Image (cartoon, rainbow, N blue to C red):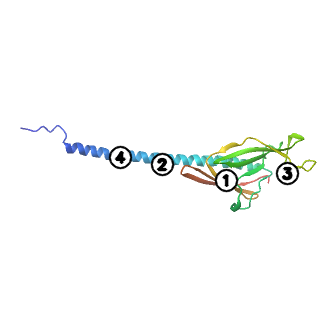
Amino acid sequence: MLKDNTGFTLIEILLAISVSLILFMILASSYDLSQKIYSRTDSKAEITQNGRVILDRITRELRQTPDIVTQIADNNSSSSHEIMFQDGHDISSINYIRYFLDGNDLDRQDIYYFFSDDPDTYVSWEAKDKYGSAPLLSSSTPKVIGEYVDDIEFWGAKLINVNLYISKGTESEILNTAIYGRNL
């Protein structure tokens, strides 16, 4: 009798399944690796963009200020972690801007000084009334301008240096800039 060879043997089927499984495992691990790389790159891009926006905003406002209220050290070994300065964009009114950390958020707050007998007129933070009294303080509700901030440092005199420590998950970044105050 002649044998009909139209089907697959058990060894051929097992070999085909083994090769298919190996190819599937290679494809699955490649997909998993690409997803991990995408996730890391996405987190890194998000914190870098967030840091860039924070530094851009601080730079624009500090560049115009005529007066920095916060005592800033000359070097970063004793740097300040918040800063308050006079807003230099609107010279018709005296108001101050304060940047500070609230947990892992960087907040911005507007601050105004005035005397009780004339609450509609804002004065310098170091002004004295006719009795030698310091002005009263009024402030806006702080607004979050940046997330994932671990720390921020300010130091310098005419050239103000800023280090921004920012992280999300396992990704972290240190961004820095130096700002020359035009009106200081």
Please report whichever mark, 3 or 2, sits nearer to the chain's N-terminal start: 2
**Which residue is rendered at x = 43% and y = 48% of the image?**
33
**Which residue is rendered at x = 84% and y = 45% of the image?**
136
Q: Which mark is residue 37?
A: 2
Secondary structure of the residue carrying tag 2 is: helix
Report, in whole angstroms, how far the alpha carbon at label 1 lies from the one at label 2.
28 Å
- Residue at the right extreme? 130
Mark 4 is surrounded, within 10 Å at the Cα level, by few (under 14), some (14 to 19) or many (20 or more) other residues, namely few
Secondary structure of the residue carrying tag 3 is: loop
Q: Are marks 4 and 3 in contact (CB under 8 Å)?
A: no
Q: Are marks 1 and 2 in contact (CB under 8 Å)?
A: no
Q: Which mark is residue 142?
A: none
Specify the amino acid type for callout 2. Answer: Ile
Closer to viewer: mark 1 or mark 2? 1
Residue bearing mark 1: 152
Q: Are marks 1 and 4 in contact (CB under 8 Å)?
A: no
Identify which residue, 110 or 88, lies in the foreground.
Answer: 110
Residue bearing mark 4: 25
- Residue at the left extreme? 1
